[in-house]
Amino acid sequence: MAEFAGKIVGYVIGTVRFPNMGHVLNIAVDPQFRRRGVGTALMKKLMEYFRGRGVSLVRLEARESNRSAHKFYLSLGFEMIGKVPLYYSDGETAFLFEKEL
């Protein structure tokens, strides 16, 4: 969780799926605090957490239409490795991203 002046401005949720795989479930940053390094700091902290739990591979999904998320994950060293059709409840495809730690 990221805070500024007592207000939550961002969070990230991740879990260890298998002994060596982490999964980023959700990340969100208040629009007023985007492009200020909040998301990057949250993801780096989560990667530290994963490393401490023996994780060597991290995966996440992002909506096909969310180009800014794609750029963000690529900038953190993730690679787009595939697509999952009809992943979201509205039928949108997810892009699958992966990163080795």
Image (spheres, grey):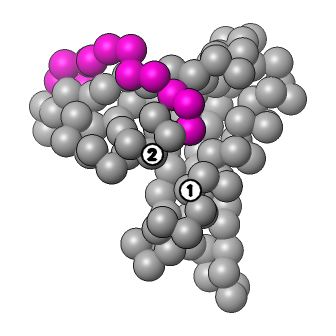
**Residue 70: quarter of image:** top left
Q: Is residue 70 above or below residue 20?
A: below
Left or right: 3, with 30 as reference point: right
Q: Residues within 10 Å of mark 1 (few under 14, many from 20)?
A: many
Helix, strand or loop for disc 2: helix
> Start and end of the magenta stretch?
76-87
Q: Is residue 82 magenta?
A: yes
Residue placed at 38% from the left, 42% from the top?
71
Query: Which residue in the structure is indicated by mark 2?
Result: 72
Q: Residue furthest bottom?
A: 5
Left or right: 32, with 101 as reference point: left
Q: Which disc is residue 39 wearing?
A: 1
Report the amino acid beneath label 2. Phe
Contact between labelled residues 1 and 2, with CB atoms less than 8 Å apart: yes
Nearer mark to the viewer, of 2 and 1: 2
Residue placed at 16% from the left, 33% from the top?
92
Q: Which disc is residue 20 wearing?
A: none
